Image (cartoon, rainbow, N blue to C red):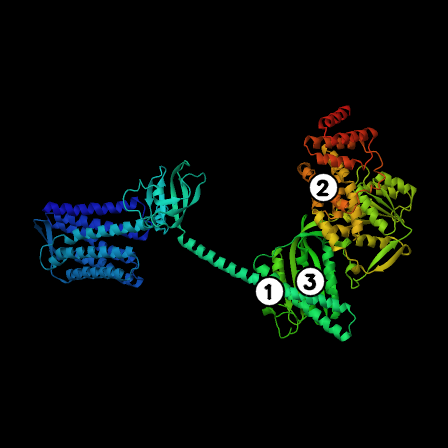
Amino acid sequence: MRYIVSLWIYSDFILALYFAISLLIKSKCKYTENCMFLVFCLSSALWSFGFFGVFIQTEPDNAYIWRAIGMVGTFAYLISAQALLCFICNMPKKFSYITQSISSLGIILYFFVIQKNQVTYEPTKYGMSYTFKPGLLNNLYTIYTIILAINMLIVVIYTLKKSKTQRLIVLAKKLLIAEGIIALGMVFDTIFPLMGLKAFPGSTLAQFIGLTVIYHSISFVNHSRINISNMSEFIYYSLKVPVLVYDASLNLQILNDSAYSFLGVKDGPLNYTGIDELFEAEHEDIFTFTEQSHDVDAICCNNNLYCSLSVNKIYDAYKDVIGYIIIVTDLSERMKSMRKLEEAKQEAESANKAKSTFLANMSHEIRTPMNAIVGFSELVLKMDIDENARKHVEDIKWSSHNLLAIINDILDFSKIESGKMELVTDTYYTSHMLNDITLIITPQAEKKGLTFNIDIDTDIPRTLFGDKVRLRSVLTNILNNAVKYTKQGSVTFKASVIKRYEDNVTLEFKISDTGIGIKEQNIPNLFKDFERLDERVHYGIEGSGLGLAIANNYINLMDGNINVESEYGKGSTFTITLEQKIIDPTPIEYEYTRESSSHNTGNISDIKISGISVLVVDDNIVNLRVAEEILRFYGLHVDTASNGTVAIELCHSRNYSLVFMDQMMPDVDGIQAMEEIRCINSHYATGGDCKIIVLTADAIKGTREALLRKGFDEYLGKPINIHQLERLFMKYIPKENINHEEVDRRAEKLDSSEIAYLKDSLPLVNVENGIYNCGGKIEDYLKILKITHDYGERQLIELENAWSKKDYNFYVIKIHALKSTLLNIGATELSEQARQQELQGKAHEYSYIDDTIKDFQSNYRKLVEDINVVLSHYKMLDNPPNDTEAEAILDSKISLQIIKNIEHYINNFDFEKVFNILEESKKFTFSEKHRSLLNRIEELMDDLSVDEILELIHSEIREV
């Protein structure tokens, strides 16, 4: 028995020492609790080792020495145990200081209780034992151990009551059991010796049980501590979403707790649980994909819930796939929310549709009788009625117009609300829009005695692409409001360029007034529906309160914005900013003038000029004829030249007052011709009587300044703008040669039926722009269409010839001329195609021309065919072109190209094109040989003798 107890105690020593060494080897002493536990282990080892020595001794003196060693371990054990428990149980600092102070008294007590006269040693069958001699010191030692036991019990109970973590509660329960065992052991070797009974090493054996419990707790703390090595495991099992891990063989290996409950998988082997047993997926093979991850929609077989499976590949260090991790997202609640949202959306749309339908029907029903009231009011006002009745009818008319405006606002607003309001974009002239606005607002401002100031940036492009009607409506609406709410002072309208790019421009329109202004707190409500601010002050001013709301919606549709600044009592400023596409970048400086928007907008001058000769130089026959027709309209004597060389010869023989010189021409261009003409005599010299005006379709910013520096007197853009042309006449022609006839142009209204016919017949053309470019009369416009038609095929042949020879420089010159021809007649989209070809050609991007020439030719031919229909309608096809150059024999290369075109169309069985070319060829003069060949081809085409025609053409080509 003696040896059993001794070996047991020795084993405790070895295990305690092992715990300490293990802690050092694993390098976990960087944590405070581990350092404290290391001391605790060494104390336990020393306690066990000392009392092991006591119980194997046979001599009392030796037993005394071993007990002295063991008691060092005992006191160290008690002190370190007290400190360790307070630390790991997070005891209050004050309590920890008190208990540690009490336990530290054991260091002093040790030197008293270890004295030889305090203990009597006697051998027993268990080994050497001892009893305490009665006295104060041994009593103090017993009290000391009991106090420490009570302190530890308090720590444990406090932890059980106050701890919020399950980990500490479990630890406290274990410590409670360990402390009970140690307390029981103390009875045998602390209480018994005090009573004169032989000591048995109960506490020595029991303290190791306490050590084991604390070791287990400390190990749990270390294991629970998140670090680099175990972080993924903690995250994996802490996730509240189901996570599955499959190996490379597609066997399920790991599930987290959420996955077990969501999928309904029972504990047991997972290897044979295939993905198809858990989910019904849209894809047959969830694990087949090339990316690192992909998402799959599926239905969980356990609960029939919609899920999203995020499947991610797991790679090893060699980038080989070793498995797959699947994260499951429950979409059931989201699907329910989406269904509810969709149902709510459908209900809202249904209600909105019903409201919009009602508003539209109501507006229509009211509009019909209102139109009758307005119309009959107009008729009555034309009758001979007394002034009193006239006043009443005018009031009826004015009120009807106001009511119609409100109805239109409501209808537009209902369209905006229902999402049916769309922009109607088209090419428009900026000056037209600005003039329209000026014409509308000026009389209103004058009627109230207000000054209407206009400030237009001269750098605004001439032609833009956007919704002109709605932009004009927005600006007019805000200007109307400015006039309505301004009792005295002025209204200012400013238009300027904020940013300008190659294809787009950002415009800013500012409308300022000196009216009543808007209170700061009311500005956020300004664009709300049916909102009218400060009604007491503005009582009597008509309106629905929708105008600004609609204006704001229009500008939002255009991707612009409206900003408002106002000072109550002083006035307001509305700033509209939006971007528009540039069609013709010519600055508006040469088109929009203050004179054109002055208060006297009812009448404009009809200029007639006498005794003045001018020369027009242009290599493009159509542009030449357009310019000639416009200039002849003013009464000028006009000579024409198709190239720079002819122009120089004509200037040698005659003194012209004005020379209109095209910039880009083959051989001798406009600049060279101008420089040579300047050297002829003093009349043409710089500063002389003749003014040389450059004609160009090149409207890039800075072009005008560059050309004036070259020596030109002025710049005129193509297509020719009438207002700019008349300004040049007023500037350079003596007043005595100019006569003015005042004509009320408001009475000259174009026939709407003719305009409608032209629009239907010419889908590629903006007819209004074309008529405007040609002087504002349909008659003049048709003449220009006739010229365009007569030379259409020739233009195409010249382009085809240049392109086939890869003479891109000549091609750019020709396409430049054709660009302005097309813009003249209003074919803006086709003109834009030509402009892009010109720009790319100048940049030596010839592949762009190669890629787009066929499309351009096809569109241009379609345009010529449409014009042919129009001219046929007006019976203008029988008039041959009055062109001296047409009487000249065509170049043999051009003639041969025409014949090759015939061959091409015959090979493609496009016989209609062949007949068209043969008909067009009659307008030109060919060599006798080629004319004879064409006549023969025409005869053979009547019988469709295709083989014979091809033989004739091949023979001609071989001969050449």
Crowding at dot 2, Cα within 10 Å, few <14 / some 14-19 / many 20+, comes out as many
Q: Is residue 458 visible?
A: no
Left or right: where 831 falls relative to 118: right
Give amino acid for label 1: Met
Which residue is tagged 1?
362
Which is more N-terminal, label 3 or label 2?
3
Between label 2 and label 3, give the one nearer the viewer. 2
Residue at the extreme left: 125
Give amino acid for label 2: Tyr
CA gap between label 2 and label 3 equals 38 Å
Residue 689, relative to residue 478: is it above or below? above
Q: What kind of element bears circle 1? A: helix
Q: What kind of element bears circle 2? A: helix
Which is more N-terminal, label 3 or label 1?
1
Between label 2 and label 1, give the one nearer the viewer. 1
Q: x and y percent of residue 539 in the render?
A: 64, 74
Which residue is tagged 2?
860
Residue situated in front as seen by the camera: 785 or 16: 785
Q: Is residue 378 visible?
A: yes
Which is more N-terminal, label 1 or label 2?
1
CA gap between label 2 and label 1 equals 47 Å
Considering the image in quadrants, where does the C terminus appear? top right
